[in-house]
Amino acid sequence: MPAKGRATATNATTQGREDILNARAISTLGAGVVSAMSAVGAAVIKKNKPALGKNADWFWHMFAKCEARAARIAEQAARDPEACGDATFIEVYAAQLPKLMAAALESHEKALKAK
């Protein structure tokens, strides 16, 4: 019985996190959108390879947060009545992810210099 209670609490915690994209959210996207998201993500990772080499754990944590936030912003834009759905989602996601990651890296560098 206690194991069941722990599993329920863990699932509730996972569902409440906004800093990761869950499988359900990804499954609602079209294949082209997921492919475009992968390409944008790969470009951002390639662009920031030195930061990945310095602190990989921090980098992947921030990348996941930035990716989820960019997806939320893109989803909101795609729901606009005048938007073109998936095309708008991809366009906004591709614009937001590099900006969010650059801002995160910049604030991280400032915090390290302040120490």
Image (cartoon, helix red, strand yellow):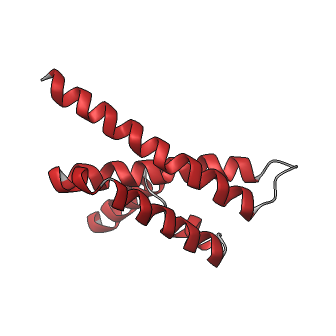
- Measured from the top left, where is residue 86 in percent x and y? 72, 64
Furthest-right residue in this view: 82
Furthest-top residue in this view: 114
Horizontal side of 48 relative to 21 (left or right) equals left
> Measuring 64% from the left and 69% from the top, which residue is drawn there?
29
Furthest-bottom residue in this view: 31
Q: Nearer the viewer, residue 2 or 49?
A: 49
Q: Is residue 112 above or below residue 25?
A: above
Horizontal side of 37 relative to 77 (left or right) equals left
Q: Nearer the viewer, residue 4 or 96?
A: 96
> Measuring 17% from the left and 30% from the top, which residue is drawn there?
112
Horizontal side of 113 relative to 59 (left or right) equals left
Q: Is residue 6 above or below residue 100?
A: below
Q: Is residue 28 above or below residue 19?
A: below
> Measuring 69% from the left and 47% from the top, which residue is drawn there?
76
- Measured from the top left, where is residue 56 in percent x and y? 20, 56
Q: Is residue 18 visible?
A: no
Q: Point out the image quarter for the N terminus.
A: bottom left
> Measuring 47% from the left and 48% from the top, which residue is drawn there?
98
- Measured from the top left, where is residue 93 in percent x and y? 59, 54
Q: How many marks?
A: 0
Q: Point out the image quarter for the C terminus.
A: top left
Q: Is residue 24 visible?
A: yes
Horizontal side of 94 relative to 41 (left or right) equals right
